[in-house]
Image (cartoon, rainbow, N blue to C red):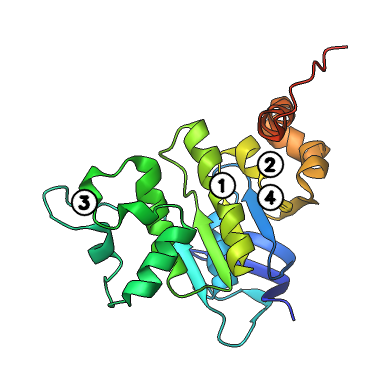
Amino acid sequence: MSLITASNMSLSHGGKIVLSDVDLTIERGEIVTIVGPNGSGKSTLLRGLIGALRPSTGLVTRKKDLKIGYVPQKLEINAALPLTVRRFLDLPNRVTQADAIAALQTAGVADHADAQMANLSGGQFQRVLLARALLIKPDVLILDEATQGLDQPGSAAFYRQIEAVRQDLNCAVIMVSHDLHVVMAASDRVLCLNGHICCQGSPDIVASAPEYRALFGSGTQGALALYRHEHTHDHHDHSH
C-alpha cells in the first residue's frame, strides 16, 4: 500500500488555486524531490500531502497511522540558553537514552550528545534537527529546504546522510529544495512544479525535460553530471 496517494488534487491558498490536477503516490523507501521556482506551490504541496491543508478538489489518502518526521529550514534557538543536544531531544517530550542515541547515530552526530546547541556548526545543527525528526521512526521524512544555510559540500554531505537514513529506516523521504543539482543527484524521483506538476521522473529525465529547462535553464544538468562525477570517484578524463 502506498504511504500517500493524491488524485486530481487541487490546493488553494487565500481563496486562490495554487496547485491543480496533482496525481502523486509516495511509496516506502523512495526519495522524492520537489523543485520549482518561488511561488510554484512546493510548500503548499507538502502541506496538502501531510494533511495540514485540505484539498479544494480531489482526494488525498494516507496510510492509517502514518508517522511523519519533519526537518524545518532552520530553528531559532536563543544562543544564551544553555541547552545540550541530548536535552534538546527531550523537548517537548522526554525520550529514552537508547532512542536518543540511536537517532543521533542515524543522523550522523552520535558524538555530539553533550555539545551545546549554540556551539554547533550549521551542518551539525541540521543533523540534530534530523535526529529529532527520526525519534518517532517516521514512515515519511519531510525536509523543507533543510540545507538552506549550508554550503554545497555541507549540503551534499547532508543528503548523503539522508540516503543512509532511508536505508536504515526504509522510510519515504520528500525533499523540497532550491539546491537543484545536489538534491537531484540524491533523488529517485523529481517532481518539477509550476502551479501543477510540469514534469516528473528520474533526475536525468527531468533535467533534460523542456519544461524543466524552461524554468531553470540547462546549466543545472551540467552541475548534475559534475556532482555524479565527484561522488562516484571516477576520475577518468572525459574530455575526448
Instruction: Report the residue at 80% width, 15% height from top.
Output: 237
In the image, residue 194 above or below residue 105: above
Label 3: few (<14), some or many (≥20) within 10 Å? some
Kindly indicate whether the residue at mark 4 contacts the one at mark 3 (C-beta within 8 angstroms): no
**In this rendering, the label closer to the viewer, 1 or 3:** 3
Give the quarter of the figure containing the N terminus.
Answer: bottom right
Instruction: Report the residue at 62% width, 43% height from top.
Output: 183
Q: Secondary structure at mark 4?
A: loop
Looking at the image, residue 74 sits to the left or right of residue 43; the answer is left
Q: Which of these two is toward me, 130 or 53?
A: 130
Mark 2 belongs to which amino acid?
Answer: Ala
Mark 4 belongs to which amino acid?
Answer: Ser
Kindly indicate whether the residue at mark 2 contacts the one at mark 1 (C-beta within 8 angstroms): yes
Query: Which residue in the structure is indicated by mark 3?
Result: 116
**In this rendering, the label closer to the viewer, 3 or 2:** 3
The disc label shown at residue 159, or none? 1
> Sequence-wise, which precedes: disc 1 or disc 3?
3
Kindly indicate whether the residue at mark 4 contacts the one at mark 2 (C-beta within 8 angstroms): yes
Residue 62 image-quadrant placement: bottom right
Tell me residue 43's x, y (percent). Answer: 53, 57
Disc 1 to disc 2, how far (Cα)? 9 Å
Kindly indicate whether the residue at mark 4 contacts the one at mark 1 (C-beta within 8 angstroms): no
Disc 1 to disc 3, how far (Cα)? 24 Å
Looking at the image, residue 89 sits to the left or right of residue 28; the answer is left
> Sequence-wise, which precedes: disc 3 or disc 4?
3
Query: Which residue in the structure is indicated by mark 4?
Result: 187
Query: Which residue in the structure is indicated by mark 2?
Result: 185
Label 2: few (<14), some or many (≥20) within 10 Å? many
Disc 1 to disc 4, how far (Cα)? 9 Å
